[in-house]
Image (spheres, rainbow, N blue to C red):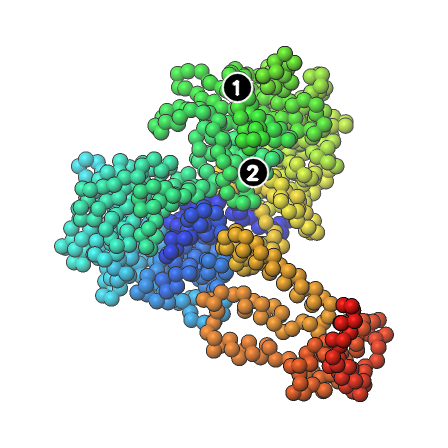
């Protein structure tokens, strides 16, 4: 079974929010940033994600506020489109098809109807040359528009968005690349180029890293690799330009930004310090230190009230006028490598992996939000290159999520390896893990694998660790003694196992906890956890065992393993023989805990392929060639909050769990189906106005009242087809719910709206029974509305769809004389009857 177009690889959860410069709305209430293939809209006060703008099919590379409408935003992507959004309501307004990948996006108020984008040069697709072109937006009412009118502005520019800036509200454009600074004037259609030398006598590195333009003066600020900032002036004439040099940063300047009034210049770099320079008084500087990570981008709100810094640890800090940090939006922390496996916390369903140095991060994939960090090392991290410090290398949870085991190690150049095995107990009141036991030097060598017994029927909690010292150890949780009432449960070593002085590389428990499989280089051994007896060894072709994985549910009798000799082997545990094997270079093998499916990532020709299969069947359920470039380093099956109901055999493996995997470029990817994409896209179109209203008693009463109104309307519409008014149509409902600022003009909508309110005389929705009553309606219609309802009830005692059994057995229609008599009786004074009842 081959690949399926309905399943695709996406960035969903854990994407970088520091990939591009964020954008702050005009009122400083919202912060927008590119995150994978979507745009996230955060509240600057609550830090919550309000909207997730989805529509792009590839990486979003730029976000830009629309100059002519402060409630709308443009976005560009490598999928070759530019999209226009209403970010306050999360609505996609228009899509412009460019046809080429777009790497950055710019605009100005002086260029109405024109955007500036950076694309690769079509004549040099493989040479990574980029050009800046003007995109003329077609003026039409269609939602999907082809925008092919492009005109070149700069022939050679950088794909880094920080290297291009507009000056004086768009009068000129500045581009920096390597050692060249280019200024392009739009009115004169002339460009001036300025060059710097590779290095001065002191060995400085003059390469441009970023550029910013003063909003009012003709001044350009450039950042350089050696930490210097240059202020360029008089660049209208090629030979009369001057620049002054500022220097505080000891490393490359990552970002520069002027405040809206031009009174200050902001700069940042690896020092994690936001520097504020006074314009024309550069000797006066203000600092905001200890921001937690290297600064990659700096943004200022249009009103100058908020500053925003993006950091290398996938974090965005919201700062109030360079005084204090008012909010922190933290994404999934991504370092250079992930030493631990990707594991899922059974309690919170959060993804757990390395976070800040010496920490584990608990990240909610469903909410796409960091829950908290757990300090494992519990030592202050010293930022010094070349200094060896403790690192968290292993993490594992038991089945209930009550215990967490971690391994931390430090290897000095001239000293032995330092190891600590720590056991953490979950504390219900604190809703976090608390250190219970620390075991110093649990092994004499590096720990290669660690796993808990995940069987729900196990009487005791059991942990197994394997090491390069040739042993594996079983650690058991013992209940506290009766005499030691103050002490809690403790851990102790129950068994030490070895096999012919071979090094154990991997280990795993069977789902029912009856077997422990340990791979000693080329030999697979099976042990009984109850008696610690060596039950059997499994034969296989030569090659060191990389991964071992037991089958689950209907495939529980199988054990699978991958070897360094590019083989995937499957053993039958009932016969202790090799069931099947196939030639495949498997870099990662894992099982879905909620089904009998397995996933195998295979490396081939510089990319990674995925195969999903059952151990009992010889054919894969799903395969995907080249899910990513390079190798997949970590992967995990995460349980879904809401199960899918896919009937296709190729996508049924995604019903219970979602497969996440981490590439060598630290991108967290997953698989999604077309049905899931459609559901998310439909939910993003729903307007939830009440989310922005404060939770007050009046709001609760209003919400209940609105809910009751909707229930009454639904009940009335289900009781009778005649009550389905034109206003209840989907078109009218959409018109009434759509915000006014995104609607067409009133003159355009008026005729359509009035036409939709008119009811045709021959409308089949009006029953034949109503026609006699309609003929009798005259100038007394307003007084006899209630009478009409009574007439309808008398004439139709049982309501059912036309042609149904109730319609066939309905009572005959009243004659005109009977209707007149009925009206006369109803108009009589019946107050005397009320008096009799009261007496």
Q: Secondary structure at mark 2?
A: loop
Q: Height in image: 822 above or below 517?
A: below
Identify the residue shown where x is 37% and y is 37%.
293
Q: x and y percent of residue 570 in the render?
A: 69, 32
Q: x and y percent of residue 703 in the render?
A: 58, 57
Binning the other alpha carbons within 10 Å of mark 2 as few (below 14), some (14 to 19) or many (20 upward) gives many
Identify the residue shown where x is 54% and y is 68%.
736
Q: Nearer the viewer, residue 604 or 739?
A: 739
As measured in the structure, the alpha-carbon distance from the residue carrying label 1 to the one carrying label 2 is: 24 Å
Q: x and y percent of residue 674 in the render?
A: 61, 54
Q: Is residue 826 left or right of residue 444?
A: right
The numbered disc on residue 350 is 2
The numbered disc on residue 753 is none
Identify the residue shown where x is 58% and y is 70%.
731
User: Which quadrant would the C terminus be assigned to in this image?
Assistant: bottom right
Q: Height in image: 644 above or below 170?
A: above
Q: x and y percent of residue 452 in the render?
A: 62, 26
Q: Is residue 198 left or right of residue 358?
A: left
The numbered disc on residue 438 is 1
């Amino acid at each position: 079974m081959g690949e399926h177009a309905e399943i695709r690889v996406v960035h969903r959860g854990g994407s970088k929010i520091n990939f591009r410069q964020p954008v702050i709305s005009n009122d400083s209430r919202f912060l927008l940033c590119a995150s994978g293939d979507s745009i996230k809209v955060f509240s600057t006060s609550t830090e919550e994600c309000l909207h997730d703008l989805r529509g792009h099919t590839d990486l979003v590379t730029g976000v830009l506020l629309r100059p002519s409408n402060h409630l709308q935003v443009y976005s560009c992507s490598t999928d070759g489109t530019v999209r226009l959004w209403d970010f306050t309501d999360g609505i996609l307004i228009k899509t412009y098809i460019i046809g080429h990948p777009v790497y950055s996006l710019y605009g100005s108020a002086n260029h109405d109807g024109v955007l500036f984008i950076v694309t690769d040069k079509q004549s040099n697709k493989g040479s990574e040359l980029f050009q800046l072109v003007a995109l003329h937006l077609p003026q039409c009412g269609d939602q999907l528009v082809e925008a092919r009118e492009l005109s070149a502005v700069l022939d050679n520019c950088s794909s880094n968005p920080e290297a291009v800036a507009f000056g004086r509200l768009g009068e000129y454009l500045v581009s920096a690349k390597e050692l060249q600074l280019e200024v392009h004037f739009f009115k004169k259609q002339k460009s001036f180029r300025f060059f710097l030398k590779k290095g001065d006598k002191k060995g400085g590195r003059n390469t441009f890293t970023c550029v910013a333009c003063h909003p009012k003066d003709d001044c350009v600020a450039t950042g350089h690799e050696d930490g210097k900032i240059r202020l360029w002036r008089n660049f209208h004439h090629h030979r009369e330009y001057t620049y002054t040099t500022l220097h505080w940063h000891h490393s490359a300047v990552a970002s520069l930004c002027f405040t809206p009034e031009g009174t200050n210049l902001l700069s940042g770099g690896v020092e994690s310090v936001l520097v504020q320079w006074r314009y024309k008084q550069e000797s006066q500087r203000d600092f905001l230190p200890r921001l937690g990570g290297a600064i990659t981008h700096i943004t200022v709100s249009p009103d100058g009230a908020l500053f925003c810094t993006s950091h290398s640890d996938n974090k965005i800090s919201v700062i109030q006028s360079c005084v204090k940090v008012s909010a922190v939006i933290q994404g999934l922390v991504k370092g250079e490598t992930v030493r631990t496996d990707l594991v899922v916390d059974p309690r919170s369903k959060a993804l757990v992996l390395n976070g800040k140095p010496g920490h584990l991060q608990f990240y909610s994939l469903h909410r796409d939000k960091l829950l908290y960090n757990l300090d494992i090392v519990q030592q202050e991290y010293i930022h010094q290159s070349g200094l060896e410090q403790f690192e968290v290398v292993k993490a594992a949870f038991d089945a209930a999520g009550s215990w967490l085991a971690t391994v931390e190690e430090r290897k000095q150049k001239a000293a032995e390896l330092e190891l600590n095995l720590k056991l953490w107990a979950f504390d219900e009141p604190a809703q976090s893990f608390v250190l219970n036991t620390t075991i110093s030097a649990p092994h004499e060598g590096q720990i290669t694998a660690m796993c808990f017994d995940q069987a729900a029927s196990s009487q005791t909690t059991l942990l197994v660790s394997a090491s390069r010292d040739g042993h594996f150890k079983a650690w058991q949780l013992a209940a506290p003694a009766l005499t030691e009432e103050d002490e809690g449960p403790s851990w102790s070593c129950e068994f030490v196992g070895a096999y012919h002085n071979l090094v154990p590389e991997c280990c795993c428990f069977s789902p029912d906890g009856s077997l422990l499989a340990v791979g000693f280089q080329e030999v697979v051994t099976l042990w009984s956890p109850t008696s610690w007896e060596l039950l059997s060894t499994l034969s296989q072709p030569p090659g060191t065992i990389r991964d071992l994985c037991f089958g689950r549910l209907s495939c529980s009798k199988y054990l699978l393993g991958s070897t360094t000799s590019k083989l995937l082997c499957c053993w039958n545990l009932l016969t202790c023989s090799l069931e099947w094997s196939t030639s495949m270079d498997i870099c990662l093998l894992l099982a879905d805990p909620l089904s009998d499916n397995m996933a195998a990532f295979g490396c081939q020709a510089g990319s990674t392929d995925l195969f999903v299969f059952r151990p009992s069947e010889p054919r894969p359920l799903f395969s995907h060639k080249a899910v990513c470039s390079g190798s997949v380093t970590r992967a995990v099956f995460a349980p879904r909050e809401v199960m899918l109901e896919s009937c296709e055999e190729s996508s049924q493996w995604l019903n219970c769990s979602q497969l996440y995997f981490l590439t060598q470029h630290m991108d967290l990817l997953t698989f999604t189906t077309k049905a899931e994409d459609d559901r998310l896209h439909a939910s993003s179109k729903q307007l939830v106005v009440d989310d922005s209203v404060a939770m007050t008693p009046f709001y609760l009463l209003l919400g209940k009242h609105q809910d009751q109104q909707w229930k009454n309307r639904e009940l009335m519409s289900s009781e009778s087809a005649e009550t389905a008014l034109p206003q209840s149509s989907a078109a009218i409902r959409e018109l009434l719910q759509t915000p006014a600022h995104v609607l067409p003009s009133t003159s355009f909508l008026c005729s359509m709206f009035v036409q939709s309110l008119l009811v045709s005389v021959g409308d089949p929705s009006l029953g034949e029974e109503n026609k006699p009553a309609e003929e009798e309606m005259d100038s007394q219609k307003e007084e006899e509305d209630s009478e009409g309802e009574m007439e309808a009830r008398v004439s139709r005692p049982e309501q059912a769809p036309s042609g149904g059994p109730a319609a066939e057995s309905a009572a005959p229609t009243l004659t005109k004389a009977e209707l007149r008599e009925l009206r006369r009786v109803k108009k009589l004074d019946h107050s005397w009857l009320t008096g009799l009842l009261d007496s």
